[in-house]
Amino acid sequence: MKTQPLWLTAGLLVLLAAALVVFAATGKTPPPARDTAVEAAIDLGLPDVYGKVFTLKEFAGQIVVIDFISVRCPWSLAYDDELRRLWRKYSTKGVQFLAINSNRNDTPAEIKAHQIANDLTFPILIDKGNKVADQYAAQTTPQVYIVDAGGRLVYAGKPCDGGPPDSLGLDKNSFAAVLDDLLAGKTLEPIRTKPWGCTIKRVPAAGKPAAR
């Protein structure tokens, strides 16, 4: 049996080790596991502010945008107008939008009042105990996830370039470009970008202080 020269084998090992070092240094992680995140959301179901329970299963065959939001986070509030604009534009093309509020300090009454006051006519779901946020590994508000018509999670991260409310880059690198590609029939590899915004105020784990 023919064997590889020792110098070639050693060289390949060095290249593999270097690649692993670069991967670790970039801090990049694989996209969230599609099956774990979305199946958990389907199984759990979440009620909207009127008590109707929504699952992803009922939107099978549609592109779905999921945005984690807050009624107190200034960055999330500053994004409301753009989110509403995108909903009005893309809902006419069959895209479904769902907002999720996973913050323990946002009451159902406050979430409902925020929806009405800001004319957010897509469902806003209440994630009591932040179970779905945990399944999706959502960390901030706003934070966007996009599921394609085939049920694949193809985008996770920031809604746009963004920053503090006084310098939001709402027209730069928006997730709308992903929707345009999907509507054009393109098959996308999963995309992950670094989210920005306020941390989701989770129910604290036993023995740990609550996030502020």
Image (cartoon, helix red, strand yellow):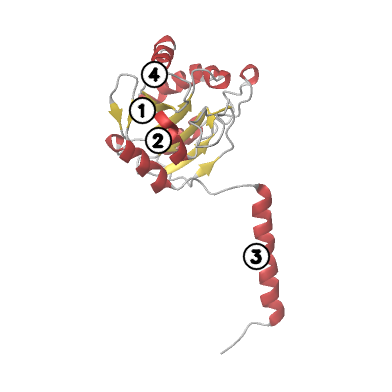
Amino acid type, label 2? Leu
Q: Which residue is rendered at x = 53% and y = 34% of the image?
A: 139
Please give the residue where the numbered disc 2 appears in the rendered image.
183
Q: Quadrant of residue 212?
A: top right
Is residue 97 depicted above or below 147 in this figure? above
Please give the residue where the numbered disc 1 appears in the rendered image.
93
- Looking at marks 1 and 2 on the same chain, the residue that comes earlier in the sequence is marked by 1
Is residue 166 depicted above or below 198 in this figure? above
Amino acid type, label 1? Lys
Closer to viewer: mark 3 or mark 1: 3
Q: Position of residue 33 (x, y in %)?
A: 45, 48
The secondary structure type at the circle numbered 3 is helix
Q: Quadrant of residue 148?
A: top left
Is residue 119 depicted above or below 37 in this figure? above
Amino acid type, label 3? Leu
Closer to viewer: mark 4 or mark 3: 4
Quick check: marks 1 and 2 in contact, CB under 8 Å?
A: yes
Q: Which residue is rendered at x = 66% and y = 59% of the image?
A: 19
**Marks 1 and 2, how far apart at CA:** 8 Å
Please give the residue where the numbered disc 3 appears in the rendered image.
16
The secondary structure type at the circle numbered 2 is helix
Closer to viewer: mark 4 or mark 2: 4
For residue 108, the mark is 4
Say which quadrant the N terminus sits in.
bottom right
Q: Position of residue 7 (x, y in %)?
A: 72, 78
**Marks 4 and 3, how far apart at CA:** 51 Å
Image check: 49 left or right of 80?
Answer: left
- Looking at marks 2 and 3 on the same chain, the residue that comes earlier in the sequence is marked by 3
